């Protein structure tokens, strides 16, 4: 069973990462697709993330999940709060019985360089340019991951990454806790490097 990592963040909140080595059929019998996904790899990613919900909480009401046209998926009655992510051959989930959560995981690549204007403010881009080569690529990937995490947690469709979710300069490390400005306040995002990926999550 390729469960890569699991953590009990507190008594009500759990997180897990799955390294996908199986095809979609392995997960299908346990969870099933909640919406049409045609590409085999995308199917496996989607199913693996759902599989983790039941791994973390066996009584998670997976088949009652609602996917709204905008905003994060949820289960009726807010019995559980959850967030899902997948990238490459990794899938992740975070589940809480008490508080809103967000998670994102992204494979480190040069792809983020092509879309930087969509998620970076001018001030953030000036800071990023102080890094060069792989360090710049790594930082950009991490910033995208952190902003995705906050967006999922914040749950305000239409929030612009380059205006409504802002990050002040920090020292790039393999793990850390980063304050992020969103709306009229700040939130704390935990991040870490996992193999060739960055993982970040938020609780509360």
Image (cartoon, grey):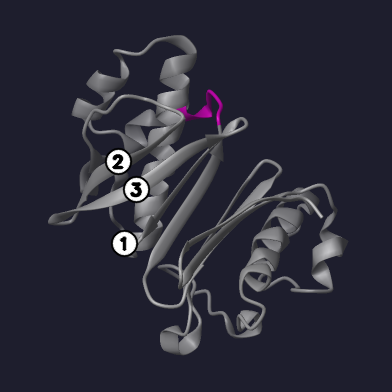
Q: CA distance from mark 1 to mark 3?
A: 12 Å
Identified at 55% across, 29% down, the residue is 108
The percent position of residue 57, horizontal first and vertical second, equals 61, 75
Which quadrant of the figure has residue 28?
A: bottom right
Q: Nearer the viewer, residue 35 or 155?
A: 155
SS assignment at label 2 = strand
Identified at 66% across, 70% down, the residue is 35
- Nearest-to-viewer mark from 1 and 2: 2
Q: Is residue 165 above or below residue 174?
A: below
Image quarter of the C terminus: bottom left
Dot 1 or dot 3: first in sequence order is: 1
Q: Main SS of the magenta segment?
A: loop
Residue 126 covered by magenta stretch: no
- Nearest-to-viewer mark from 1 and 3: 3
Identified at 34% across, 48% down, the residue is 189
Give the labeled residue for mark 1.
154
Dot 3 or dot 2: first in sequence order is: 2
Give the labeled residue for mark 2.
178
Per the rendered image, the range of residues in magenta is 108-112
Q: CA distance from mark 1 to mark 2?
A: 16 Å
Give the labeled residue for mark 3.
189
The percent position of residue 50, horizontal first and vertical second, equals 66, 67
Q: Nearer the viewer, residue 101 or 114?
A: 101
SS assignment at label 1 = helix
Image quarter of the N terminus: bottom right
Q: Residue furthest top?
A: 132
Category of crowding for the residue at label 3, using alpha-carbon neighbours closer than 10 angstroms: few (below 14), some (14–19), many (at least 20): many
Identified at 67% across, 78% down, the residue is 58
SS assignment at label 3 = strand
């Amino acid at each position: 069973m390729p469960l890569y990592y699991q953590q009990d963040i507190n008594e009500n909140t759990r997180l897990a990462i799955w390294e996908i080595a199986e095809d979609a059929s392995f997960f299908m019998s346990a969870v099933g697709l909640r919406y049409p996904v045609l590409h085999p790899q995308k199917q496996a990613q989607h199913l693996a993330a759902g599989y983790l919900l039941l791994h973390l909480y066996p009584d998670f009401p997976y088949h009652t999940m609602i996917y709204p046209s905008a905003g994060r998926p949820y289960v009726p009655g807010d019995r559980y709060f959850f967030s899902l992510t997948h990238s490459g051959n990794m899938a992740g989930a975070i589940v809480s019985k008490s508080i809103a959560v967000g998670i994102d995981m992204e494979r480190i690549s040069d792809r983020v360089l092509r879309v930087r204007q969509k998620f970076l403010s001018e001030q953030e881009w000036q800071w990023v340019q102080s890094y060069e080569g792989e360090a710049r690529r790594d930082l950009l990937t991490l910033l995208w991951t952190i902003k995705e995490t906050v967006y999922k947690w914040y749950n305000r469709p239409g929030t612009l990454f380059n205006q409504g979710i802002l990050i002040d300069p920090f020292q790039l490390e393999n793990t850390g806790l980063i304050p992020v400005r969103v709306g009229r306040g700040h939130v704390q995002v935990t991040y870490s490097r996992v193999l060739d990926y960055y993982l970040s999550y938020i609780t509360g």
